[in-house]
Image: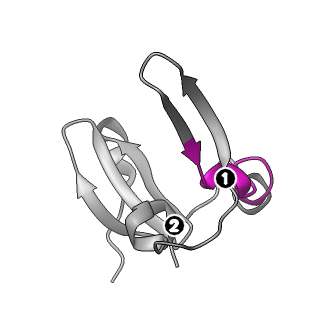
Amino acid sequence: MDKAYQTSFELLKKGQKIDAVILSIDPDREKIALGLKQLEPDPWTDKIPAQFRLGDEVSGKVLKMTDFGIFLEMEEALKGSSIRRRSCSLLRAVR
């Protein structure tokens, strides 16, 4: 289950007990913002630096092309990596 791309409505059911992190408290509006992903380990601190190094050649699936870059899915947990348009001449299509 890819939590990064699902809403809380898709992940949770009414009556379900969960743990969450308080992100903010707004007494004026009587609201508390809660977060779920803050309970998960941050992949940017351990997993990604251990798996990828500067200069590595990687493969991925193009998810989106914009004026400022290309977004790739390099693996299930790593989506949305941007390649700047000026670097596109370095890319080669692999089938």
Is residue 60 in view?
A: yes
Residue displayed at 45% across by 15% down: 28
**Is 43 colored magenta in this rendering?**
yes
Left or right of 54? Residue 41 is right
Name the one closer to the observer, 8 or 69. 8
Residue indicated by mark 1:
20
- Residue found at x 49% / y 71%: 12
Q: In this view, does 25 lie to the left or right of 6?
A: right
Q: Which amino acid does label 1 sit on?
A: Ala
Say which label, 2 or 1, has the lower sequence index: 2
Question: Which residue does the image show at 70% across and 59% down from the upper left?
Answer: 19
> How is this picture coloured?
one colour
Crowding near the residue tagged with mark 1, few <14, some 14–19, many ≥20 C-alpha atoms within 10 Å? few
Residue drawn 58% across the image and 62% down it: 57
Q: Mark 2 points at which residue?
A: 3
Q: Where is residue 72 in the image (x, y as percent from the top left)?
A: 39, 60
Q: In this view, does 78 lie to the left or right of 87?
A: right
Query: 30 or 59: which is nearer to us?
Result: 30
Image: 40 above or below 29: below
What kind of residue is marked 2? Lys
Vertically, is 65 above or below 22? Answer: below
> Hey, which residue is sitting farthest top in the picture?
28
**Left or right, 22 with reference to 8:** right
Kind of element beneath mark 2: helix
**Distance between mark 2 and mark 1 Cα atoms:** 14 Å
Which mark, by number, is residue 53?
none
Look at the image and give the residue range highlighted in magenta.
Answer: 34-48
Q: Where is residue 86 in the image (x, y as percent from the top left)?
A: 32, 36
> Which image quadrant: the C terminus?
bottom left
Residue 85 horizontal/vertical position (percent) = 29, 40
Tally the numbered discs: 2
Q: Is residue 76 inside the magenta stretch? A: no
